[in-house]
Amino acid sequence: MKKHRVTFLPDGISLEVPDGTTIAEAAKLAEVHINNLCGGQGVCGECRVIVLRGQAEADEASAAFFSQEELDKGFLLACQTEIHDGLEIMIPPESRLEEVKIITREASEISGRGELRPLARKFYLELPPPTIEDNISDSERISRELRKKLGWHSYEIALSCLQRLSLTLRDNGWNVTATVVNKGKNYRIVKVEPGDSTSRNYGVAIDVGTTTVVAQLADINSGTVLGVEGTHNLQASYGEDVISRMIFACSKEGGLHPLHEAIIKNINDLIGKLTEEKDIPREEINAIVAAGNTTMSHFLLGLIPCSIRVEPYVPAADVYPQILAREIGIHIDPSGILETIPSVASYVGGDIVSGVMACGIPDRPEVRGLIDIGTNGEIAIGNNEWLVCCSASAGPAFEGGGTRCGMRATRGAIEKVEISDGHLHYQTIGNARPRGICGSGLIDCIYELVRNEIISADGKFSRDRTDPRLTYQDDVPQYTIASGDETEDGRPIVITEPDIGNLIKSKGAVFAAIKSLMDYIGLEFSQLETLYVAGGFGSYLDIDKAVSIGLLPDIPREKIRFVGNSSLAGARLCLLSESALEKCLNISRSMTNIELSIYQPFMNEYIAALFLPHTDRKLFPSVRY
Amino acid sequence: MKKHRVTFLPDGISLEVPDGTTIAEAAKLAEVHINNLCGGQGVCGECRVIVLRGQAEADEASAAFFSQEELDKGFLLACQTEIHDGLEIMIPPESRLEEVKIITREASEISGRGELRPLARKFYLELPPPTIEDNISDSERISRELRKKLGWHSYEIALSCLQRLSLTLRDNGWNVTATVVNKGKNYRIVKVEPGDSTSRNYGVAIDVGTTTVVAQLADINSGTVLGVEGTHNLQASYGEDVISRMIFACSKEGGLHPLHEAIIKNINDLIGKLTEEKDIPREEINAIVAAGNTTMSHFLLGLIPCSIRVEPYVPAADVYPQILAREIGIHIDPSGILETIPSVASYVGGDIVSGVMACGIPDRPEVRGLIDIGTNGEIAIGNNEWLVCCSASAGPAFEGGGTRCGMRATRGAIEKVEISDGHLHYQTIGNARPRGICGSGLIDCIYELVRNEIISADGKFSRDRTDPRLTYQDDVPQYTIASGDETEDGRPIVITEPDIGNLIKSKGAVFAAIKSLMDYIGLEFSQLETLYVAGGFGSYLDIDKAVSIGLLPDIPREKIRFVGNSSLAGARLCLLSESALEKCLNISRSMTNIELSIYQPFMNEYIAALFLPHTDRKLFPSVRY
């Protein structure tokens, strides 16, 4: 088969690919990341590349995404263009998948709660050697000694451990270290090592996010966090969000495989980095706890996720079995276990369960809530007697999709905007030249536009206003945030009236979900003791502005608290405490999920919320503009 | 490397082997079986072969086993002779390992006890398809339906099963069959199949004996036994008894491996035969229960058995984990489980536990006993409140070892002897020309010799007697049972005074064990309601003669009952009933093992029992001679 050499700029990575390979596939082979929101269906226009050298033609579909000027420059969609010639390809900044900020911060109340009782525990045993008067079996001798330390239990012993047990004991003068894990209600001896190795007992907590995967390495004897590493979810090559990845996985037999492999590679890479940094053999890791949304948990364990996406939204499982990490190809100790935090429903996953546990919501009588805003806004509210939750499809607006100049919160994204005295100021991530606007920047924009009466409460521009930043393209009003002179690629960064419309729909869906949930349980917002805001988006949010546009409820601002990556924090708590994992199981079983798509009051709330801040101003008494 | 062609007669099997291979190794490669009591150490003299063609020299050690006449004929020890030439080798009848009678008979009280609740159960589920009002996860939908049939349990689901669950349910209109196994106190869903496959659910019960391996195939839905097959334990190539096999396994790194592989091959072959006969795919076998002595259970599971053999006689385990059969290379359904019946101690194994359960000893208040006589005599006595057991080293006499013309109970073995009116009559297995005397024949001999006053109660020949059958070799008296004219190989079959001495020691050890155990619990023989006699040897025994020589206690003969292969019967009961397996675990935990080697009264009893029938005639009131 004919092959062609392809070089990707600006990295200068070069490789040969067979004739007919798409540019997107070639990029994946080269491990060069290109945005791919729609999963390669040619409908999102996020994978723009420029062919600098060699022949390549845009197909008809691609052409629609570009101006004639861009087509002349060689702009193409990477996912729709086949390679039939040697090519030199520039990936423009807006198509690059760059390092995002990794959220590992936690609210102060999270760390260190609960007793230390890690999922894998090591016990040093100085066994009395057998005598003719005391010649019970080797395994029973170990169990007997463990009972003195752990209390009466029946201990199951893994076959692999049992097979060499007799030698391990005798070669080491009956002084050994037993590793014990909890499985269901039973104890299982998974490893017996020579001498005293109790001081070396490590675990990894993992937040398997759709965009990023973050891992924490911990000494699980002491609970000390030794390091944290994060990376992009390699599944991004198959689609930016869970929906497009599910479409990929379910489009053909074996489609799940590369997605499963991608997340396993992520995890192995992260564990590799963490263990190298700390000079700890990865074989000394005895337990992993992973938290992710329901789709990610399915990808992680290799469960077919295809029914999650379509009505009636059914996952294969919401409680996941304890497995050996090696069963899914994760390299730690061969007897190391992996627990996956249980989900509640297709769109309320283990990440939320983990967060609810980490925030201690089920521990106290006060009513508290947790909200995680991404493509879906997931909300959980409850106390020590009840828990309810729901998930609202917010659309991609807060993550930079669905708006003309939206982008993820990576370098060059406008994250803050202020308009005062007719002057507009903005701030970008990394103080780089602006490349687009991320979620928090968009919320700022809306807020500033309303406050300065540039748009009205329904999100429409005041057309009679004269403002050099307010222009029209094909009669659609748009407001310039950064002119072409200021931006990295020379294209102006604007926010259009349809963009504002999309953002209002997104914030309306989230607010309507919170309101519906409160009404369902018959409580007023004033009865919320705390509203925790989790996740990547949350951390950069200006709470006052988020309330003012009607995204978050109008409660005293000190009641709204960022908890950072509560999913990761919860996974770590589970790693360090059996009872935390038990709590997660109870949360997953007892939390009532309100399916908003069939909950009539939600639709009414949604329509009422399509206003800035809301059609019912009484709900936002503190908002003044 | 130089190779030589070797042909084994009478089978005519031919193969090429590298220069320096021993004849015994070549025979193993050719799958021709040669007796090998000592495991190839050149000390038992059981592997006699005749080199008919080609050059081969007896080493000095071998030479000691043969007369000059035999050496001239080409007699050699197969285990001590290296091959340096093309050879034609005759395996004489006494060295052939021939088919033994396979004991599958059971006492009538065994079959069909207990409720039918097999280890793997299949449930046909017609699941209501999910709706938006009822969109619990697929695994929870299955669990919910199972709870209706099985009661409230938390069901664990195997990862392999969960991975494709979503498709299996949807591709089959939500009508599926779930296979559920019991693990500890939990239920585990191991398989979900399309449609209704409940009618096809099979299991295998295996008695892993030192000499023979016997397997029963059962329909575990109905409890019907579909077939039974038995075969020689292939480990015989590594030694005839457990001690020599343990020596082999422990003599070098990896020595366990071939012994483990041998028993796995045995089991796979038996399952192959059984499933072919019944035209059942082996993948429809969902559960196996194996019962064996402690050493065999270790070999089966690949546990290092080396500490069993030496004081203080400690096994690696006496309770064995439930495993997947495929973990040890047994080919059945990939999710099929294997349970191994727990042992009590190094020399009281799962075969005895299985037998005690099968005989129902712990079910009733009456005191009953079970005795299994082989190289070891294992004895268990108890009722529904207590159980005690012990194991006495009886030596190989009852299995044909340790006596000049002893052999196993195979074709040509003299199994019955009677002397009346000065005439000796014998009967051989298969009515073949006699080749040796097996255990029951030896017991008959002793009995007849005492009864006819040819030997006295101390086992010595009356030297003043004139009897053409009584001759002397090197001043050692011997009694001819069959003359050279009558036997297959032309050598006379005799019983010598030392043979009788060995037999008296063997029977003395067994009786002393029973007596010590009764004294330990403070009971008289008359208080035994039943004494069950298990195992291969038992079935051919003449009870009256066994009592008369002082092997079995002198209780009313109707109280002594053969139970055949109670180990196999117990394994099958466990396969068909969770509660039977539970009972075995209780027996293994609660039975008190008396270590006879440190139990002083045993030694006194043993010395007292070295007489025919006993030094204390009051113990044998019914014996007259």
Image (cartoon, coloured by chain):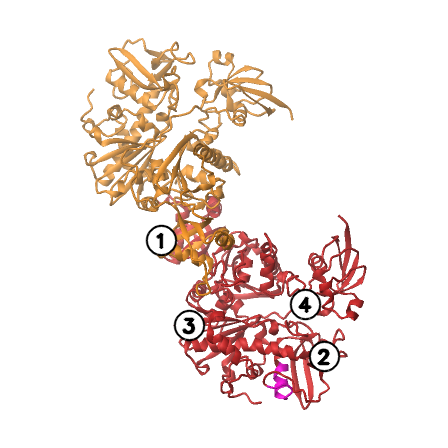
Chain colours: A red, B orange
Residue under pointer 2: A473
Query: Looking at this view, is B258 or B505 the one in front?
Result: B258
Give the mark, 3 or 2, whose residue is nearer the N terminus.
3
Give the mark, 3 or 4, whose residue is nearer the N terminus.
4
> Do marks 2 and 4 share a subunit?
yes
A294 left or right of B373 in image: right
Quadrant including the N terminus of chain B: top right
The residue type indicated by label 3 comes to: Asp
Residue under pointer 3: A363
Label 1 marks a residue whose chain is B
Q: Distance between the residues labelled 2 and 1?
A: 67 Å
Residue under pointer 4: A98
Give the mark, 2 or 4, whose residue is nearer the N terminus.
4
Q: Residues within 10 Å of mark 2 (few under 14, many from 20)?
A: few
Q: Which of marks 2 and 1 is in front?
A: 2
Q: Which of marks 1 and 4 is in front?
A: 1
Q: Distance between the residues labelled 2 and 4?
A: 30 Å
Image coords of residue B166 (percent x, y): 50, 55
- Secondary structure category for the residue under label 1: helix
Residue under pointer 1: B149
Query: Looking at this view, is A568 or B95 the one in front?
Result: A568
A212 left or right of B204 in image: right
Is residue A308 found inside the magenta-colored segment of the image? no
